[in-house]
Image (tube, rainbow, N blue to C red):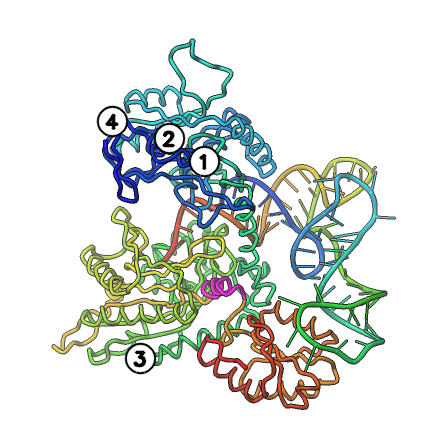
Amino acid sequence: MNITLPDGSIKTFDQPNVTARDVAKSIGEGLAKAALGAKVDGQLYDLDRPITQDAKVAIVTKPRLDKEGKTKGEHNPDALYLLRHSCAHVMAEAIQRLWPEALLAYGPPLDNGFYYDITLEKPISTDDFANIEAEMKKIVEENRPFTRYELPTDQGLKRLIAEDNKYKIDNAQRAIAGGANTLSWYVTGPLPTSDIRHQTSDIPRWEDLCQGPHVPSTGEIAAFKVMSVASSHWHGDVESDRFQRVYGTAFFSQADLDAYLEQLEQARQRDHRVIGSRLGLFAIDEMVGQGLILWKPKGAIIRQELQNFITGHLKRQGYQQVFTPHIGKLDLFRTSGHFPYYRESQYPPLIDHDHLTTIAKEGCTCAELANRLDKGEVDGYLLKPMNCPFHIKVFDSEKRSYRDMPIRLAEFGTVYRWEQSGELNGMTRVRGFTQDDAHLFVTEDQLDAEVAGCLDLVKIVFKTLGMDDYRVRVGLRDPGSDKYVGEPAQWDKAEAACKRAAETLGVPFTAEPGEAAFYGPKIDFVVKDVIGRSWQLGTVQVDYQLPNRFDLSYVGQDNRPHRPVMIHRAPFGSMERFVGCLIEHFGGAFPLWLSPEQVRVLPISDKFLAYSNKVLDALKQAGLRAAADESNERVNAKIKNAQEEKIPYMLVVGGKDEAAGSVSVRCRTRGDLGALPLEVFVTKAVEEVSTQGRATVSV
RNA sequence: GCCACCUUAGCUCAGUGGUAGAGCAAUGCUUUCGUAAAGCAUAGGUCGUGGGUUCAAAUCCCACAGGUGGCUCCA
């Protein structure tokens, strides 16, 4: 048998079944010792699983550790995958030792750890973690091998049915449906044998239906931690059985685990909710309501600057600004489809006084009221969940000619959605938010160019702010779902347009069925927050449906009515979510043009307050956002405060500066830059603001 | 909405049945200072809300509200 190694060299083995361990040994004893498994033709294998045909094999090894015990260089994702998958087994075994009635469902590795879904009457609480970890420690110290064995599918299923774990039976049936010829188990311990004389009952043993692969032995799991517990559902179906999902993580060394935990702690300090409150950017007040953001003055500056920035681009690209109300009649949203399709995620309708009194006198119950609202027998107003119906009505308010097209209507439109309470998150998932929204009414011919223009705008936003760590998702309809409006043929056209546009984008994208809006497919820009959660920011959506539903038309060159196509787009997405992500992106240290306070003057004592005021006036005259720290602190303390508040430039002023008409510039990132004539600093700072980023102040 | 956990001064937190604490911030006074924390003093609380148990509750129990992490959802 020929095994091709990563360097291209070929090793020939005589025996029919070679294992990765054999391959590793043939290369060197050291490699064999460090080996955990292998990539065989791209698929991860156990170290001792037979390789039955010629294959490309790369040995997966445990990492080398530096003198602090940390992994040298990058973590190897394959090695961590094996380790964490194995640790999930160890944790499941530990949980079953503590609660033998626990029923196991599914326990995969994740990017940063693993989880196991179990059913267990007793709620597992954070207080139980230490006990679980103690049992896990024992299992690791027992250093038992992970041993794979396989059964033909019929035999295997029979076993599972006898064991009466419907989740494992389901897993097996899915594997079989996916083409598996055998079912595999992993025993933590030696293989069970039918020969009773060889049973070594004093050696603990535990097994789990699992496709593997695993590290050779529990002893490889050098460091682990049970992180959290949450509820989850079987196949993600809320109607189905509920599991307790226990999360954990594992590393090849305690130092790696410690570093990871430290990194989590640092991420927590970057969290926009922490920074937002520390820097006084925004607040959420429970008396105002969950998920409703109060933009404090400093946060409002950031938002306003971003709005000004995008508005400048809109003017250049031929957009027209409009303003529309926050509420509209239910009929508007019945026509658009929002009310029937997404009723449960909207605030309930507002009904006028007289009407409410009348139906109350009739003894109308809440259920009846809801029913009548559905049927359209009772009218009311809806707090708008989207701006599009209003922009459609602006378009429809006059006769349109092909000569007018495309018509691009923009508004910073505030919308309200009844997000589930458990979903709310700081500024990134809220119930009231302002979209930097626009709707483009275009002819078929204009569609591609206009979508491209929208994508350009999104790219400009991300580039200007240095946010290059995003992914692009083309959200398509889920063919199996009935939540979409319109004809499949038009969906096909719209999806094709999105794909064409995505291909010209110049960045990789993924097509994801089921991620479309109810009226059309979309191209989304998705970024991750400090905790690793993904948030959709910019979005561009192609819509053939709403123009139909509102019977929109323009007069073509042929003097006949034609249906426009709509593009919905929001380069930021929502101001709330975008600023939330931006706070984390910059860690609160905004570039000069966005900083709420751009310059702080620090007089070294109150003898220099007069000069400090003169400097402050000059800064304000130049349009810079500046303040002076007139407190009774020493300059060191003033600097510390300003640094912690992430003020980009500090101007230390004392006797020398007063005499020379200069300021001693300290930069937030570059430290003391020395003295500059006041007017030179002002000019440079103003220039830096106008360039939206690059630091131009230097001495 | 579901599960677990959390809620004590503006912020970060200590306090597990017996008189509510610390650091930072705030305020006042002293100090007048040159690149990441001067000193002293003062003030600040119905311990999320409402019920219950107890001679006694921040502490134990119940409900509710808000928050955190997941799940589900996300036009």
Residue named by callout 3: A318
Quarter of the figure with residue A33: top left
The answer to whether mark 2 and mark 4 are in CB contact below 8 A is no
The reply to the same-chain question for discs 2 and 4 is yes
Q: Which residues are magenta?
A: A577-588
Res. A210 mark = 2
Residue named by callout 1: A117
Looking at the image, can residue A351 be seen? no
Res. A14 mark = 4
SS class, disc 4: loop
Quarter of the figure with residue A280: bottom right
Give the amino acid at mark 3: Gly
Q: CA distance from mark 1 to mark 4?
A: 43 Å
Q: CA distance from mark 2 to mark 4?
A: 30 Å
Res. A198 mark = none
The answer to whether mark 1 and mark 2 are in CB contact below 8 A is no
Depth check, mark 4 against mark 3: the one in front is 4
Q: CA distance from mark 1 to mark 3?
A: 53 Å
Give the amino acid at mark 2: Cys
Eyeballing the image, is A647 above or below A155? below
Q: CA distance from mark 4 to mark 3?
A: 73 Å
- Front in this rendered view, residue A332 or A482: A482
Please rate how many residues cluster around mark 4, counting C-alpha atoms within 10 Å: few if below 14, some from 14 to 19, many from 20.
Answer: few
x, y percentage for residue A15? 26, 25
SS class, disc 2: loop
The chain letter for the residue carrying disc 4 is: A
x, y percentage for residue A298? 56, 72
Q: CA distance from mark 3 to mark 2?
A: 58 Å
* Residue name at image x 55 percent, y 35 percent: A124
Eyeballing the image, is A580 above or below B58? below
